[in-house]
Amino acid sequence: ETGVTQSPTHLIKTRGQQVTLRCSSQSGHNTVSWYQQALGQGPQFIFQYYREEENGRGNFPPRFSGLQFPNYSSELNVNALELDDSALYLCASTLAGGGQEQYFGPGTRLTVT
Amino acid sequence: GESVGLHLPTLSVQEGDNSIINCAYSNSASDYFIWYKQESGKGPQFIIDIRSNMDKRQGQRVTVLLNKTVKHLSLQIAATQPGDSAVYFCAEGLSGYSTLTFGKGTMLLVSP
């Protein structure tokens, strides 16, 4: 167990809807990253938050957005869901500084129909 | 849980064999590399890491080798056990940046 928790475990949404996924970081970790993992692929970096500010973003459109709270928990929001958004969404926490091991949560499986 | 291993390269070994999983990384500037293990329905689990100033690092039953000349990383698992069956990902990163770029993954199947 990494100490990183995510909710919900599974979620089914309809195309065009909005979704919010949640992540609670490992205690003491002030940096959280979100990844999208399509079936049979490696995780793809979405964005990272450090001290409640976005601190790097991958190749994802603006309808993917996030928040980090003072207690370092975070949210991933996706608007106008598309079928291709169906994936496992992973959050990972780490201490700022880079080159550090990232601790992953179990993920949220999102299915868009 | 659902499979994370569809359409992935697969390595099949017998219990007790040594396994070698290979990875080609993409960014010659990357200076930090990690191997993760992902079991079905779970998030990636850290196995071992290595920095670019090293070419070999050993852990418990695992060894990572780094060849920066050809941008190649390998994970060696000694005395492979059925519990080692999973998908293995290499990931690369840059010091000062916490983001990671993951490879495509290899499924390891261990037969008793």
Image (cartoon, coloured by chain):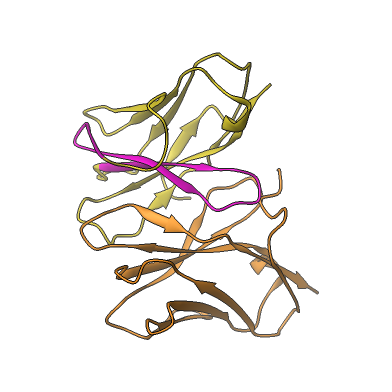
Chain colours: A yellow, B orange
Is B53 in front, or is B58? B53
Taking the image as shown, residue B7 lies to the left or right of residue A91, namely: right
Taking the image as shown, residue B65 lies to the left or right of residue B76, namely: left
**Residue B54 on image: x %, y %:** 31, 84
Please determine whether, in this image, residue A74 is positioned above or below residue A39.
above
Name which residue lies at 35% across and 39% down.
A47
The prevailing secondary structure element of the residues shown in magenta is strand
Please determine whether, in this image, residue A56 is positioned above or below residue B95.
above
**Residue A60 on image: x %, y %:** 42, 36
**Residue A45 on image: x %, y %:** 42, 46
Is A6 in front, or is A77? A77
Q: Give the extent of the magenta segment.
A: A31-55
- Asked if residue A38 lies in the magenta stretch, the reply is yes
Please determine whether, in this image, residue A67 is positioned above or below residue B76.
above
Name which residue lies at 59% across and 62% down.
B105
Is A29 in front, or is B29? B29
User: Which quadrant would residue A4 be assigned to in this image?
Assistant: top left
